[in-house]
């Protein structure tokens, strides 16, 4: 019963956030925070553009979402697969173990760091 309540609360929060991100443009709304790293250093962090990318995706603009933050765009399917593997953890522990292997985690970290470097060097 407790787990069901937690799942329902998470779904409700995600639904409310989805409606907010769909309805309000992060570029013009004061509701959304600006990136502290960008403000402090002038360089983009790996997450810069994520709010705009989510807004664009929810409004059906896939190209703009990719331009705002390609790493987020590419990570969404990976995140969905990991969430699915988490829900099937007991039924398929081999899949779960493969997706949560140290090698894949290090590869993902390397990809994020590479994205961080390339987006600042080439102004992506």
Image (tube, grey):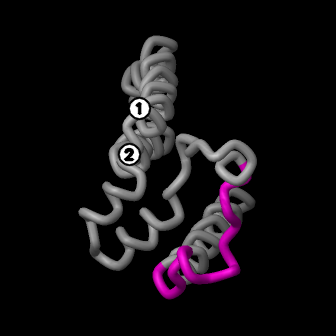
For the C terminus, give its image quadrant.
top left
Q: Nearer the viewer, residue 20 or 97?
A: 20
Q: Which of pointers 1 and 2 lies earlier in the amino acid sequence?
A: 1
Instruction: Give the labeled residue for mark 1.
Output: 118
Answer with left or right where residue 14 lies relative to residue 110.
right
Q: Nearer the viewer, residue 82 or 24?
A: 24
Identify whether 102 is placed above or below 48. above
Q: Position of residue 29 (x, y in %)?
A: 62, 82
- Mark 1 burial class by Cα count in 10 Å: few <14, some 14-19, many 20+: few
Q: Tell me the chief SS of the magenta region.
A: loop
Q: Secondary structure at mark 1?
A: helix
Tell me which corner region of the image, top left, top right, bottom left or bottom right, holds residue 74: top left
Identify whether 27 is placed above or below 109. below
Tell me which corner region of the image, top left, top right, bottom left or bottom right, holds residue 114: top left
Question: In the rendering, which numbered label is found on residue 124?
Answer: 2
Q: Position of residue 93 (x, y in %)?
A: 44, 24
Answer with left or right where residue 58 lies relative to residue 21.
left
Q: How many marks on residues?
A: 2
Residue segment shown in magenta: 22-36
Q: Residue at x 47, y 20 (%)?
A: 110
Q: CA distance from mark 1 to mark 2?
A: 7 Å
Residues tagged 1 and 2 counted as in contact (Cβ below 8 A)? yes
Q: Residue at x 46, y 81 (%)?
A: 22
Q: Position of residue 100 (x, y in %)?
A: 49, 23
Identify whether 22 is placed above or below 61. below
Q: Position of residue 59 (x, y in %)?
A: 35, 79
Q: Residue at x 51, y 24 (%)?
A: 109
Residue 91: in magenta span: no
For the N terminus, give its image quadrant.
bottom right
Residue 34: in magenta span: yes
């Amino acid at each position: 019963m407790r787990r069901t309540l937690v799942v329902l609360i998470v779904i409700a929060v995600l639904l409310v956030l989805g409606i907010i991100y769909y309805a309000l443009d992060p570029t013009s709304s004061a509701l959304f925070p600006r990136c502290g790293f960008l403000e402090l250093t002038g360089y983009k962090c790996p997450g810069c553009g994520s709010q705009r990318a989510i807004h664009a995706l929810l409004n059906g603009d896939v190209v703009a979402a990719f331009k705002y933050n390609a790493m987020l765009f590419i990570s969404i399917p990976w995140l969905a697969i990991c969430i699915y593997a988490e829900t099937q953890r007991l039924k398929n522990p081999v899949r779960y173990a493969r997706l949560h292997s140290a090698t894949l985690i290090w590869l993902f970290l390397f990809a994020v760091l590479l994205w961080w470097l390339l987006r600042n060097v080439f102004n992506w």
